[in-house]
Amino acid sequence: MTFVVTEKCIKCKLTDCVEACPVDCFHEGPNMLVINPDECIDCNLCVSQCPIDAIFEEDNLPNDQRHMIEHNAKYAQHWPILDYQKEPLDDSDSWIDAPNKMQYFEE
């Protein structure tokens, strides 16, 4: 079992969760983060640190976010590791509660 970053992270990319990760399993894309399932040790530390509740345990992932399991695994192989907290995207506050954000995903 692993933890999964959901669509809610798209266009927000808040990195509070990264600081909590003891194994550097977060990878950074242009407008979101993903978790490498092969590196995640299921410690659960990142979940409580995500200010927008965008991270779920795989078994507790909402049904409409199940596609994000594969998404996290795929992009963790291509994007660089992020192991420090960064400033959020400039307009992240306006995207926090936006629905259906997959259409804004950037590779």
Image (spheres, rainbow, N blue to C red):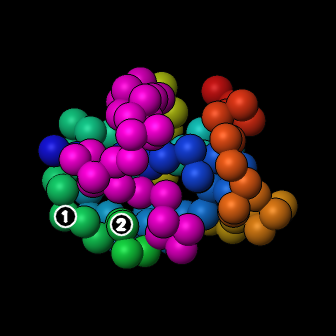
Does the magenta segment cover residue 4?
Answer: no
Picture mark count: 2
The amino acid pointed to by label 2 is Cys
Q: Is residue 63 magenta?
A: yes
- Res. 8 in view: yes
Residue 101: image tag: none
Quarter of the image where the N terminus is located: top left
The local crowd at label 2, few if under 14, some if 14 to 19, many if 20 or more residues have their Cα within 10 Å, is many
Work out which residue is located at the far front of the displayed protein and give it. Answer: 63
Q: Residue at x 60, y 39 (%)?
A: 29
In the image, 33 versus 60, the foreground residue is: 60
Which residue is located at x 47 percent, y 38 percent? Answer: 64
Tags 1 and 2 touching, CB below 8 Å: yes
The residue type indicated by label 1 comes to: Cys
Is 97 left or right of 56, judged from the image as shown?
Answer: right
Residue bearing mark 1: 43
Q: Using the rendered image of the protein, determine whether residue 30 is visible from the camera's viewpoint.
A: no
Distance from Cα at disc 1 to Cα at disc 2 = 8 Å
Q: Residue 72: name its quadrant.
A: top left
Q: Residue at point 56% right, 68% down?
A: 52
Q: Quadrant of the C terminus?
A: top right
Q: Which residue is mark 2?
A: 46
Magenta region: 50-76
Nearer-the-camera pick, 83 or 55: 55
